[in-house]
Amino acid sequence: MTDISKASTVSSSFAPSERIALAAMIIFFALAPLVIYPFFLMNAICFALFACAFNLLIGYVGLLSFGHAMFLGVAGYVSAHTAKVWGVTPEIAVLLSVAASTTLGVIVGSLAIRRQGIYFAMITLALSQMVYFFCVQAPFTHGEDGIQSVPRGKLFGFIDLSNETACYIVVVLVFLAGFLLIHRTISSPFGEILKAIRENEQRAISLGYKTDRYKLMAFVLSASLAGLAGGMKAIMAQNASLTDVHWSMSGEVVLMTLVGGLGTVFGPVVGAFVIVAMQNYLSPYGSWVTVIQGAVFVACVLVFRRGIVGEISHLLGKPL
Amino acid sequence: MFGVSTQALFGQLLLGLINGSFYALLSLGLAVIFGMLNIINFAHGALYMMGAFCAYFLLNWAGVGYWGALLLAPLIVGAIGVVIERTMLQWLSGLDHLYGLLLTFGLALIIQGLFQNTFGSSGMPYAIPKELTGGQNLGFMFLPNYRAWVVAFSLVICLGTWFIIERTKLGAYLRAATENPGLVRAMGINVPRMITLTYGAGVALAALAGVLAAPINQVRPLMGADLIIIVFAVVVIGGMGSIMGSILTGFLLGLVEGLTKVFYPEASSTVIFVVMTVVLLVKPAGLFGRSA
Amino acid sequence: MKKLHAISWAALLLCASGAAFAQDKNVKIGNLNDMSSLYADLGGPGSTLAAQMAIEDSGLTAKGWKIEVIGADHQNKPDIGSNIARQWYDVDKVDVIVDTPNSGVALAVAAVTKDKNGVFINSGAASSDLTGKACTPNTVHWTYDTYALANTTGKAVVKAGGDSWFFLTADYAFGHALERDTEAVVLANSGKVLGKVRHPLNTSDFSSFLLQAQSSKAKIVGLANAGGDTTNSIKQASEFGITSGGQKLAALLLFITDVHALGLNVAQGLSFTESFYWDMNDQTRAFADRFSKRMKNGAKPSMVQAGVYAGVLHYLKALEALGGNPHDGAKVVAKMKEMPTDDPLFGKGQIRADGRKIHPVYLFEVKKPSESKGPWDYYKLIATTPANEAFRPLAESECPLVKK
């Protein structure tokens, strides 16, 4: 391999430190079900994908979306509804939900990317509030009762997902596919342009890039992947509810990404696991969950601004 | 008009104005804080709630009534705000907006959680002060005296704040300090202290709104939790950092919301976000903001 | 291994009940509740205490049973609720989930409970669907439901002359159900509905809606909402002179904790339905005394907490009758339905085939401040709907378990 070709391929694959982390993550996914409740793991993995999708926008394009719950939630409703009422197989349900969130992503994205910074955040918040209103009103979502008892069904008609192990493997594989796609995107030439936009949009424009088009593409990709997470979560958890469309979910994904490490590859995964574990294992303590969550927020902003993975990566001096 | 009598419409508009005065007071505080500190204070709703609780404590533990609370609660909560600024927010200057927003969001969660743990969630009653009970029959509606007082009082406070910031020397320093802190410091003014006090003042405004709301709503730990998002929208629509903008928009959106409650009540909590989207797309700096 | 066999044989022989399987006397009860938000006061930690008291009063501990209660916060989110329920059944080996206010969460938990063949004794949720089209062989719905609320309040108020109604309804499934059920009762008793308005959940200002209610000139303003929405609308109704103007409020769902929060000045004269009040008789008073001594804030039990106590007590009786814990939810619930119920709080009653617990339901009115002897002395009894009339008749049930 010549130096030149090495230089061009190195950016599109994992750095050595990232490779080790990736291997560690896969080993963790393989062994964890032996000691940790698989259902909890699947739930956390879905949120991890959601957080990774969100991180694609904030970490690499510098766009803070404060309405990302709409993609997660709407996709969840679509896959729950199609799987339960139309009786389609899980892969079709998830595909339809991704299609729905992609469409929503195109609409919201093309409106929102016209604005920057805090205005971008506000416009996504406003649009997600409208989506929330739609979900409260639309009869098929069953309001605050949500869609319950969604059948997990048989993947491709023959893999029975009601088997916990099968379901777990599928969730892990879908997550890895999404995760690798995101990584592939950010380390491709397309990703380099995104980072250039984040650093200095004016310069990217003057270099001849139609930055709006790149931003929109990144936004739509992020929306689709968030939808993938939501669609898969609805099948796996067998329900879809207003929780996933509410603005506090949009806040939660910010928290996950921040705790894990903004703009790191593995940060959102770690962050999602930490937050979901907190909600899960602290639930006997009632409103102390809120207090602890708030304290984590404050501590992250004041002391660990790089997040867990960001701090580790900083200590090691290697990207993660 | 659309099956609604003009009388009823007047009534609804008046009610919208009353709600608008809460939005105006709260968004005014937010706008002041944003203008001076560049921080989007997500804890505003929680501090508003603390104002209401403060009034409740003053009454039940110290025997201080409504009128005393109107003065003391903003001072007490404002002092807490000063502590928050000194211990936490001041470390964030120069960082992205995002961090201020996240920190104050975290603070809001902590404050609300602690209050819920201690006081449960149903809340406590707080009576309307004796002097303001009863109401006037305006012909088209019954206007409780207390509501009339809320509109008048918040109007005075809003205009007073606007006057201080836009028309006095102190306000001029404040505005200059946000534009160019170095220059103002060179003039011998303690900029950090000014910023701290500004945050305290913004928080005091939220607490004041909380005291005003106590006799109308239950004093509940979550009373500010959903309000904050709406007040946010008001500030954005008015133009971030624009004092007059947020006052006017507060009242304006109260009216819009009031009308929606007549024609499409289910959407009354969403209409503000529709307005916000339209405004952001057409006039990104907000209705009254200086263009960015 | 042989030794172990010998021991278990010995244990079997010691058991006089003659059951053919080894006696398992371990029971785990999970109180899945709103611990931090709008229902935390009427259920919440108080429900854990109620379950604890039921265990103590059952006397089973003295007979060698090991029974424990755990609690968790579902945060009013159906997904979190069903996740916790799943984990409880799978990992923590919980046998029975109790209380669970919030209909959305309750429906989700009922579905999981059926999947895992656990037991679900609901007290706090309102939806009559739990024993209607969403009924399962594993669910018992103890305290009240939307049908009973609508039926008792609606009927009694219309009979007392309140024949024209205006509904103030929370715009979500629970509010709609309550409004629908009440409207049906009002119409059936030849009352009429002059109008309705639907408000978003968690509205802080009701003045606009109340004004519409006022101009409708309806005699009764029916509040088909819950929690903070109800207390705020009641408070503002008094402020805007609705009640002094001659219109009456009928709160379709109100708990004693709400009345306590509102204060008698504001709440006086309200009529609403509950199936339990602590000051009914000596037994309820004795229970309430013991309960409030152990509550952090000295609160009296709400009907939801009373329902948890009675439900757990009956559940434990059924287990005792079965001679041990079979860890088979459907079997235990079948036993619970077979045995007549009898407890100090709700008296004698039964659980129907659809899982509905049957007992009388009462219409109360909130006392004037001058009539109240002190904190928590709030209600006077206006009317009693007998057990066989209070709940939806089996003939109208959509529950597949009901054979027609």
Image (cartoon, coloured by chain):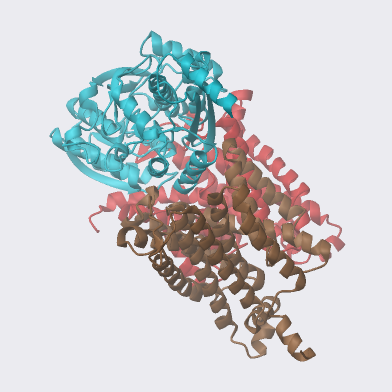
Q: Is residue B205 visible?
A: no
Residue at 14% across / 35% down in the picture?
C188
Q: Which quarter of the figure is the N terminus of chain B placed in? A: bottom left
The residue sitting at 20% across, 33% down in the picture is: C394
Q: Position of residue B282 (x, y in %)?
A: 49, 74
**In the depicted structure, whether residue A191 falls above or below residue C107:** below
Q: Is residue C176 left or right of residue C81?
A: left
Q: In the image as oriented, which residue stretches furthest toward the top?
A: C282
Decide if residue C288 is on the left or right side of residue B1.
right
Please determine whether, in this image, residue A295 is positioned above or below residue B102: above
Depth order, front residue of C230/B193: C230
Where residue B217 appears, as percent x and y from the top left, is 47, 38
Q: Position of residue A41 (x, y in %)?
A: 57, 53
Where C307 sits versus B217, above or below? above
Asked which quadrant contains residue C175, the reply is top left
The letter of the red chain is B
Q: Nearer the viewer, residue C343 or C119?
A: C119
Q: Nearer the viewer, residue C160 or B107?
A: B107
Residue C80 at x, y percent in the picture:
50, 46
Who's the residue at 35% across and 50% down the image?
Answer: B12
Q: Colour of chain A?
A: brown
| Total residue callouts | 0
Horizontal placement of A161 versus B197: left or right? left
Name the image quarter holding the C terminus of chain B: bottom right
Which image quadrant is residue C279 in?
A: top left
Looking at the image, which residue sits at the far left?
Answer: C190
- Name chain C's colour: cyan
